[in-house]
Image: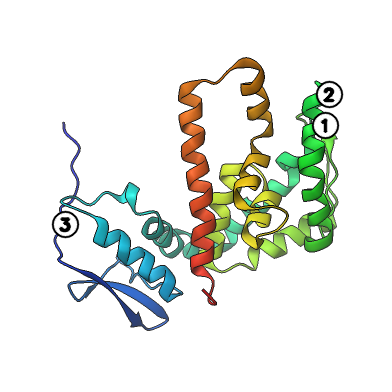
Amino acid sequence: MADWAPKRFWTAAEVAEAEGGFTVLLDGRPVRTPAKAPLILPTRAMAEAAAAEWDAQEREIRPQTMPVTRAANAAIDKVRAQHAEVAALIAAYGESDLICHRAEAPAGLAARQVAAWDPLLDWARAALGAPLIPTVGILPRAQPPESLAALHARVSGLDDFALTALSDLVALSGSLVIGLAAMDDAVAPIERLWEMSRIDETWQQEHWGVDAEAAEAASIRRRDFVQARRFRDLARKSA
């Protein structure tokens, strides 16, 4: 059976102020989320980005081409309803963060990890109050309880839209520290932070070749990582 997609039914999308923020109007009618909640966005910049996505739809509505709208829907319909649970799941990445698991060999890979990941650990200690201890191998080591508590407090203090962005950043990178650095524009630019999360995969490609299917999947994940940071920027009240 052929895929079905809802048809475009409006002429123009525009931004309007609404109680609690901004919304998108389609021919004067406010957009709602899939759960039928009002699509109330925290900033005009986010509402304008969402409206542009709606305007860009042609004959059929393609949600995969609407990342801002999809993330906003998730923030309203999912994260808002279970904020504490989502925060706890994200904070738990600190217990076995990617950047704490180091290779013993080969020496070149180990050195590359140290060069990229030690500055992130330094930042986590200084900026987040969360010293983390690296270890060799894939088995996690117990991290300081005070560090895990600091990370949990930082994550749980985020609003629904910021937590939605962080959830994607962490899931895509495998690192809570990298995700938080991306949120704060710290340590390195967003593209470099993505590269830091891919050190092991990049090493494998350099020595064993590139698998086309895996490379395509990685490219999509990289795009989504950058988009998650953009969503965070759009959610900032100063934006």
Identify the residue shown where x is 16% and y is 31%. 1
Up the image or down, 228 lies above or below 116; here it is below
Describe residue 81's horizontal placement relative to residue 154 as left or right: left
Is label 2 in a helix, a strand or a loop?
Answer: helix
Residue type, label 2: Ala
Mark drawn on residue 135 = none
Q: What residue would you read off at disc 1?
A: 111
State the image coordinates of residue 176 (x, y, percent, origin top left): 67, 50
Q: Work out whether residue 34 can be spotted.
A: no
Identify the residue shown where x is 41% and y is 75%. 44
Q: Residues within 10 Å of mark 3 (few under 14, many from 20)?
A: some
Q: Work out whether residue 5 can be spotted.
A: yes
Up the image or down, 44 lies above or below 99; here it is below
Q: Are marks 3 and 1 in contact (CB under 8 Å)?
A: no
Q: Are marks 2 and 1 in contact (CB under 8 Å)?
A: yes
State the image coordinates of residue 179 (x, y, percent, origin top left): 64, 52
Is label 3 in a helix, a strand or a loop?
Answer: loop
Is label 1 in a helix, a strand or a loop?
Answer: helix
Mark drawn on residue 8 = 3
Residue type, label 1: Ala
Q: Residues within 10 Å of mark 1 (few under 14, many from 20)?
A: some
Image quadrant of residue 55? bottom left
Marks 2/1: CA distance?
6 Å
